[in-house]
Image (cartoon, helix red, strand yellow):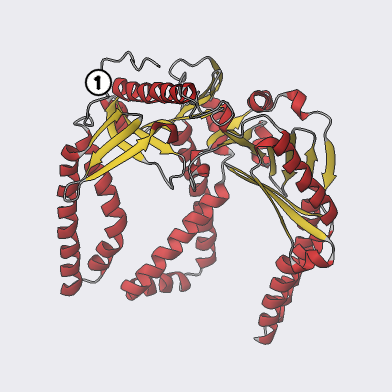
Amino acid sequence: MINHSFDTKIPLNVPQRQNPLAIGFIFLKFLRKAVRQLWLLILIVVFNKGDGYMAWLLGGVIAISAIQLVLSLISYFKYYFHVKDGELIISKGVLQKTNLNIPLDRIQTINFQQNLLHQILNVVSVEVDTAGSAKSELTIDALSRDKAEALRDYILQKKKELIAEKREEGELDEESTEGIDTPEVEEFTKPDKMVFRLSPKDLLKVGVSGNHIRTFFWIIGSVFGLLQFIDVTEEEAVDYVFKGISENTWGFGWFVAGFGVLIVASFFITLIQHILRYFDLRLWETEKGFKLIAGLFNRQEQSAAHRKIQIIKWVTDPLKRMFGLHTVRLFQASSQQVSAKKSITIPGCYEEQLEEIIATNFPSELREDYKEHAISPLIITRHVLYFGILPALAVAGFKAFTGDWFGLVYLLWIPIVWLLSRRYQRYWRWWINEETLTTRSGIIASRHSIIHLYKVQAVKISQSPYQKRKNLASVHFYTAAGSVGIPYINLDLAKRLRDYVVYKVEVSEGAWM
């Protein structure tokens, strides 16, 4: 039998409470949630002065929220966790008692997070993610760093012992448990090798080359949403603003100036977001996998085992290309619906660092003897039809119908879509050899992905009516961490590709996770 002793001064086999500081974090979490839910109602009450009904409604909602807050704070004293008989056991609930038993062999990741207050108080938030759950199974708001690390090590040690014991008793064989007896965070408390550390200069490059367009449209949407809200609740205020603009001979100049302000604001907002999120980013590699720590006010610690990394994707765009940077994402097998959240994002690394990260899971010898393929140029026809001709004719036709013949200029959108679609088709490539599949796509940004063939869990061939007429198909390869697709290839080639990948999965002796 296996010796179940584990060297820790914290008796985690008996019920434990969170750190008393968790009461404060529970209160802050409730406050953030209440503000997100009630801000609109508060604005309505403010703008609708004298509306007693809305004020009473707000008062009632606040009273209910206060009761919920009291129950949330009491819940601290009713929340216990411990490890017993191969399970992580959580007891919680104020009005209704709940016991949650999590088998240790279901636990996939144990991650730590620290916001600014966590860092000041030297505590961490612990997230336990399990196979099959739709979100983190367990979140502990505040534990001391020592206690959190002891809990993590204790759980993972017990998990190893449990699996080894089941093997000894013949309940599990080597093949069925390959990969699950060496948890991904087992050795992450002693990092081996630092792959790289994001310097202040590189962090600035990452922020400057961020997605400013997305931020710009987010600001535009927020502004229009606010104007619409004000228009509904205080119509005269909006009339006053727009009347002043329309009567100003420099109205167009103000519009241009405002547009410029929004562009500058989007740049600095994106820059600040990246600095806060990726401050002092460090990536380590150990024998077991990767560990990433980053963040200024919200310090996050993520980990991924090599055996669980299913897909590696990397992207570069003109701004990043100017600095020689790539954004890399490591997609690991995780719970349902949370693979994207659990992926590790490395926002900016150079070519040599990118190669080092890829080589840990896809050594260079596995990326040789590739056979290159393109996608069908018929995809250009469909893109031009759906994204060019139909929208342009609709807008231009409507303008002409209303007597605005200048609207015919919208027809210029058709050749623009044709040029973009042509570039998309010419740039799209996929490579396959006996072990891996690599894809490349993009119009402005360059997007790459790579997967092991033996880790594919399902292959899907789909055809639109147009593809059926042209004997074409799209192929999607599904893994435990997401999918990779190839559009518009010959149907016979798609079937051969599907059969080949299924064959590689069946004959492979490697564990998919």
Decide: is 464 above or below 131.
below
Q: Is residue 113 among the parts visible in the rendering?
A: yes
**Nearest the eye: 406 or 502:** 502
Horizontal relation, residue 262 to residue 97: left or right: right
Name the residue: 41% across, 69% down: 228
Decide: is 483 above or below 228.
above
**Nearest the eye: 466 or 396:** 466
| Farthest front residue in view | 170
Residue 436 place in picture, x, y as percent:
73, 35
How many numbered discs sit on the rendered protein? 1
For the C terminus, the quadrant is top right
For the N terminus, the quadrant is top left
Decide: is 174 above or below 437.
above
Name the residue: 71% across, 24% down: 363
Secondary structure at numbered mark 1:
loop
Q: Which residue is mark 1?
A: 11
Horizontal relation, residue 278 to residue 445: left or right: left
Residue 434 place in picture, x, y as percent:
79, 33
Q: Residues within 10 Å of mark 1 (few under 14, many from 20)?
A: some
Q: Is residue 107 among the parts visible in the rendering?
A: no
**Nearest the eye: 118 or 232:** 118
